[in-house]
Image (tube, rainbow, N blue to C red):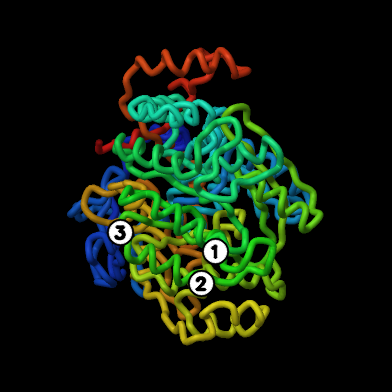
Amino acid sequence: MTQDDAVARQAEAHALAHGLATAHKDIRIVNGRVHDPINNIDGELRDVCIRDGRIVAEVGPDARRVDAHGMVILPGGVDMHSHIAGPKVNMARRMMLEDHRHDAHPRRAHMRSGTGGAVPSTFATGYRYAMLGYTTVLDAAVPPLGARQALQELHDTPIVDKGYFILMGNNQLLFKLIKEGRRAEIRDTVAWWLNATKGYTTKLVNPGGVEMWKRGNRNITGMDEEVDGFGVTSRQIIQALAEAVNGLGLPHPIHLHCNNLGISGNYTTTLDSMRSLTGQRAHLAHIQFHSYGGKAGGRPTSRAREIAEYVNEHPEISADVGQVMFGQAVTMTADAPVSYMLHKITGNTWINSDVEQESGCGIMPFVYQDKNYVHALQWGIGLELFLLSKDPWRMVLSTDHPNGGSFMSYPRLIRLLMDREFRNEQIRAVNQAAMKRTQLLDNLEREYTLQEITIITRAGPAKLLGLKDKGHLGVGADADITIYEMKDDKEAMFSSPRYVIKDGEVIIEDGEFRRDLGAEIQGRVLHVAPDYDPEIERVIRPFFDEFYSMQYENYSVGDQYLRKHQVVACHG
């Protein structure tokens, strides 16, 4: 290699690392079976062609050929509900020192150092998602005041495209506007906050309940109970914000974490929450944690069938499962009452943080044990929801990482769904009293097909997020592609893709990161920028002046904090 060649190679690597590259090599993937549910392609032998970071109809004879014989070609994975950045994640990282110490990610010539475990560091998070074939990840809960920090962390999370949902379910200014019925101002306030924080959509966590708990350790008990001092109810909060978000035409509707998470009997609250939406689009987060029968304070039972049936019958409702996986986890949630409850039950160390007028957060390390009745029941309820769902486009895969388990457990979860014999073997090995409270012993013999797995891990989440260029392999789509070697052992198959292509660049080849460029590619930050009436600032500014410790002028995240990013269009 000449000196000029070396300089050119170095310049190319620098451009790729900073998201500046504009020229991509043409690629033709041949001899593989394509799974592309959005375009109704189910295991067909097809070529996939790439140019300039996009899927195209055809490339020339000089294009690089990738031989996918004996392999399947899928869109890059899309995780629509995870926790990978922001104040809560950093607190959790500080609590998990031993976990990090046992799972170091050493620095290499082409990769940064980091730590793994239940809450990996920024660099390790990007690498490990990519190593599973995932190319897009959304963080599900960032307080507005934490947005600047979360954005900086996401810029340090390589390869994957990413974004975050902004917490608004316990926002005191919105409570005031909701109480006074100022619907147009609610919509403009939500739009202003999303612009100010570079957020993707609105997240509601235990709406009203967190603020109630902060005022005296008493959670909301019913959807129509007023929040002390504010004169609003959970039902009013959910209805008002669903109306505002859908009125703005955001690509993803409200992302709702219902009241009474983890409480026996909470399935009635979940059903009541869904009914209160009266036809409005909404997505329910980690619905497994909201599908429990029994009486509060007693042993939970499964009510997965009732929840699954409601979702099946209401196409405006979607959900991610929040599957529990046995082993180390970390509960990190804006639902501080839940963390407090777990702390009282287990005695484990916990942290709680109040984010001014906006949210709360509780964090606690946790281990799910297969012989524990409650843990095994939670595991079983998640599987029931998957197996009872009639529409995989609206019941998609998540573990609520790291709350129900690490995203690194996704391959095992996929095997549980695809391999009936393996699943039944695991069912027989866990707490049997819990299994008798589910329907897993009653001939739930369904096995997910590879096409259905492609839906719940790729096409479905992309569609629910309104990401029209992701989750499929049609002409014009982002060239985010994963190629897996077909194996009988689906856990092994999905643990190690043969190829991962991000924005038209081969990141992983023959199961390994490419040393010349792969691990340093920076993904985009995805966010929205809905229109709003600038007069709304006359409502917002006085609230800041009276209650916030930060001045209004310093609150918004400026465009200078954005590097490689993409504004996802609203359709209102």
Q: Residue at x 56, y 73 (%)?
A: 380
Q: Which of the image's four quarters has the C terminus?
A: top left
Measured as percent of width and height from the top left, residue 306 is found at: 45, 69
Residue shown at the point (52%, 42%) measured from the top left:
207
Q: Quadrant of the N terminus?
A: top left
Residue at point 46% right, 20% down? 558
Report whether residue 339 is seen: yes
390, above or below 131, in the image? below
1 or 3: tag closer to the N-terminus: 3
Q: Name the residue furthest right.
A: 347
Query: Which numbered tag is attached to residue 315?
Result: 3
Amino acid type of the residue that numbered disc 3 sits on in the rendered structure: Pro
Q: Nearer the viewer, residue 132 or 230?
A: 230
Q: Residues within 10 Å of mark 1 (few under 14, many from 20)?
A: many
Give me the C-alpha separation between circle 2 and circle 3.
21 Å
Q: Which mark is residue 383?
A: 2
Total labels drawn: 3
Task: Describe residue 393's horizontal placement relative to residue 210 as left or right.
Answer: left
Mark number, residue 323 = 1
| 2 or 3: mark nearer the eye | 3
**Local SS, label 3:** loop
Q: Nearer the viewer, mark 1 or mark 3?
A: 3
* Kind of residue at badge 1: Gln
